[in-house]
Image (cartoon, rainbow, N blue to C red):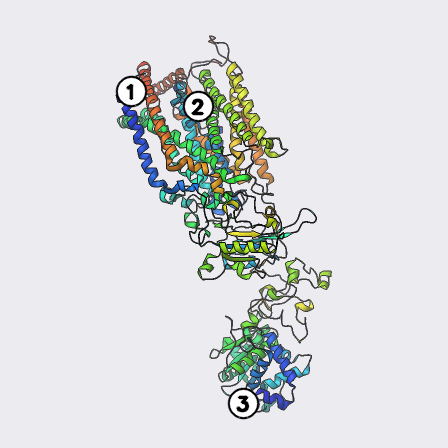
Amino acid sequence: MELNRRDLLKKLSAGTAAAAAGGAVSVAALGGIAHAEEPAQAPAEAVGLLYDATRCIGCQSCVVACTKANGLEPDNRRDPLHQAPTDLNSRTKTIIKLYKPAKAGEEFSYVKQQCMHCVDPACVAACMFGGLKKDAKSGIVTWTGKYCVGCRYCEIACPYHVPKFRWEGFNPEIVKCELCKERLAKGQEPACTSVCPRKAVIFGPRKQLLDEAKSRIAANPGKYYQDRVFGEHEGGGTQVLYLAHVDFENLGLPALGDESVPQKYLKWQHRLYSYLIVPIGLYATLVGTISKNWKHHQEHAEIEEKNTGLRPQI
Amino acid sequence: MSKHQTIAEQLEAAGVSRRSFVQLCGMLMVSAPVGLALTSKQSVLQVAETIGKAKRPSVIWLHFQDCTGCSETLLRTSRPDVADLILNVISLDYHETLMAASGYQAEAALKQAVDENAGKFVLVVEGSIPTKDKGQYMKLAGKPAIDVLNEIGNKAAAVIAMGSCAAWGGVPSADPNPTGAQGVDSILKSKPVVNLPGCPTNPYNLLAVVLEYATMNRLPALDQYNRPKFAFDRLIHDHCPRRAHFDNGRFVKEFGDDGHREGWCLYKMGCKGPVTHAACSTRHFNETPDVWPIGIGAPCVGCTEKDIAFRVPIFQTVEIHGVTPPDAYPLVNMPIGTVGLGAAALVGAVAGGLGGAALMASKRLPESAPPAGKVENETKKSEKPQPVGD
Amino acid sequence: MKTETWERDVPVFDVPIWTRPFIALCGLGALGMLLVAYREIVGLGPASGMNDAYAWGIWKTFNTMVLTGVGSGAFAVGIAAWIFKRNNLHVVMRTALLTSLLAYLFGLAMLGVDVGRPWNFYWIAFPWHWNLHSPLLEVAVCMSVYATIPLLLENVPAGLEYAFDQWPQYQPILKKVEKFLMAGYPWIVSLAYVLPAMHQSSLGALMLLGGTRVSPLWQTPFLPLLYVWAAAFLGFACVTSTILFSGIMWNRPFDLDVLNELNRITIWLIGAWLVFRTVDLTVRGQIVAAFHADIYAVLFWMEMILLAVSVWMLRDANANQNVRKMFIGQLVVAVAGMLYRFSPTTLAFQPKPGAFYFPSAIETLISLGFIAIAVAIFIFLAKILAILPAPMRLWNAMEARKARKASAQKVPARVGRGQLVTGD
């Protein structure tokens, strides 16, 4: 085939123009996506909870206090006389569950479930328009209705199954623990920690809570499962920490590696789409190839038109 | 009645032992642990001293449409010296049931009591006030109750409506309320009224209010219905000794059944505890433990509540507002999600239908083409392409 | 049956529009719409079987994720035709384009029904509010742009041709529009291949965040690649099945050469895909999971075996010119491909022990309703626009019919290149 200089220049300029335009747009739009490569750190003033399952007596005062402090209607759908949800849901931001040992000789344990306020939350990475955001100072993950589309991707993404959708009625929401941020703003503790009669769940800066957890472990060797606190590194780290005398997996805390969920699973997406280089490059290449084929196709179509007298069908 | 000296002096004169008096103060602290400045953060001896220094408050007690149950409750004790104590701690200057006088002497006694202590006495009202037909249904010395209340009430320093009848109308106000019975605060608007609903109310409620007034010269903190918070800020349900049975789903189904004998929760028998504000679950009557309705196995009828007592049938169950968790827990992983028979059948039908249709359609396709070059084909060819339909 | 070369796209001119199946589809669609109104009023819970464990039911996962994969004909056949210069596929391009457009538009519409707060979708127009980490954002933006710009523009020529024919008075303007479109066509078409490559792979990336809750037989860092690859052969399956089914229903002749080509490309795509998936499983050390006695292994083998069987069927069909086998084979490809794309979202996704999901009847009916409307629209458009491929004799027959009708009514006929010709 003939490729004169004119055609070549045309094609090259077409491709370059496309790349340049796209590059400009992507640089303007994409900013810091390259920084996704570094593992996230907890903010300096990160706050959180430390729940010690060995101290919990299952009184459920935290459940009552949480419902009240958040202005929620206690969930008595399953049992009209009691607040007895079976899991976190749109009316329940924290819950006490029971682990019944499967084998004889194993111990039972209570577990308090609520949002883990992860250091690098999967829900925040998943949310399309930033409906779920992690506060830069306190690290609390909050939900704003303004940006939420109700797609429920956060429910799928969260490895702890925390965000819950309100399934009935119009104008639904995503409901989850937000560490009583209104109370914190008034200098109070979160509702659950303020009523716990045994201080099984306590509130404080994450660093302090980690130290406290570690000192408890050091003071009681062999008492706590694998002598470690859950949430220090798991899934990239969480701001809600757990101490227990049974396997964390039995308490609904999955075995995650040290990488956060977004870090682990979205690495290649970030790399491929970084600054939109790959898509723009692909586009430029395609324009180049297809322009050429298009030209031949048009020539062929013109000949056909002459022969049949019919307009070409594109 | 006696001259108004300090309570300590009166007690000594009456020969009441200091021990009995300190015991009374202890009872007071038990009945009003919070919300009463008199007993707040004080030791028993401190409370005794404070009360001892106070002047005996003058109390005038009016009866209207009542059963006198609230007076009885004040005296219904198992230990006589408590009644004595009460009568020595306060100066009960007019009480129709207890005083010796009657007829003109009684009327004179009332007048004298009111005049002597004008502006200083505590008015206790027992019974509701009829308002229909110019209030003719209850008259005291020929005067309708409304007028008596207004006249005497305006001269009182504080007014206490003792019992549900005085607080909001009580039994006489039950449908169809033929006498137009109303509570004190619907009639008397010029003075603050402390409501002590209950049928009867616990006597220590009255005592606590009167003594607080006598010693501190103020009334205790009241809620939006002017009931003292120290007694009426909580539901029976929230302090009920049988709550553990409620939380564990152990309910009496029939009077006399095994559960009833075990002392199980009376919710299903119509107990109004979950909607009734009162302190009965922690402060029982007759100074004997478990002498209160639920304690003896009878469901609470909600006697303090205007919307419940004598309106909602005794054995009708009530809705629980502000439910709390039961004494049970969900497991870490509970089953979630079900499939309905119709839904499953629909999907099966659709899948089957589509599969069947595809198979049927494919049958209309030839399995092989004849060798190249053959012009004839299997379908009929005619001038116009046959419209074979869908 | 003799093979006839497809030379041109011809409307299905000899079949009335209001047929029983068409009415049935419209009825199903109307029922679906009524149920959508119900869903909007009562909320997602009562109208579907979705729950907090399976927060995505069949609407997002099937109608959007799977059916847009099926509707990747424009993408797959287009790339084969325009980049790999399989020029004989140009004649089936319009079928591919229309099926894709309908699949995408109704997939996006289904998304609008599925989300709980659709009024907040307007944030899509504010790029500074986009969370660039979210694969779902990439899907939403990219799919919307694709369906409404390049894919739509690619479908415009069929409409232009119709307008040219029906309203000759507008021919000058239409010619201008066409010229404008032609000038930018390579740019449009290139976008029409880059964008689906992006979002079809991002659809795969969505379930990456499911982590270990997606069975390892599906969960792989290459999930996006496998998804877009599956979209490619699903697109071929859709286009081929559509043409074959239309041929059965409307008695249209087949061009065995083109069908051969379509089948061959499908075979290669599937073959390489099967190899890649197997190698990926082995390298990741997860191949043992295929031999566990559980539902996941069963599903895995169903997918793999069905695809292998389809390859065998298509090869056989090509060799023996067996059109029936081609049809069944391509349907098997479609079923297996859809199963593959559906599995990691629902069937092979176990959020936690004890969790279960099955679509409710209303949910299924709404899903079917949307599909029914899309199919009905396709049928309707195939009858009035030149979409389906046919030999020249059909075109001539159509023109002859038009001429006969015009002479019967004694009005000037519009025939051929849009020039006025009197009836006798």
Chain bearing mark 1: C
Chain bearing mark 2: C
Which residue type does callout 1 highlight?
Answer: Gln
* Residue sitting at x 39%, y 30%: C194
Q: Which residue is mark 1?
A: C419
Circle 2 — which element?
loop
Q: Residue C69: image x %, image y %?
A: 46, 31
The numbered mark, 1 or 2, whose residue comes first in the sequence reads: 2
Closer mark to the observer between disc 1 and disc 3: 3
Circle 1 — which element?
strand
Q: Which residue is mark 2?
A: C15
Residue A128 appears in the picture as rendered: yes
Asked if residue B78 lies left or right of residue C128, the reply is right
Q: CA distance from mark 3 to mark 2?
A: 109 Å
Q: CA distance from mark 1 to mark 2?
A: 26 Å
Q: In the displayed orientation, state which residue is furthest to the top.
A: B373
Tell me, yes or no, whether dots 1 and 2 are on the same chain.
yes
In the picture, residue B160 is in which quadrant?
bottom right
Q: Are marks 1 and 2 in contact (CB under 8 Å)?
A: no
The label number, if any, that marks residue B111 in the structure image: 3
Tell which of B341 and A72 is nearer to you.
A72
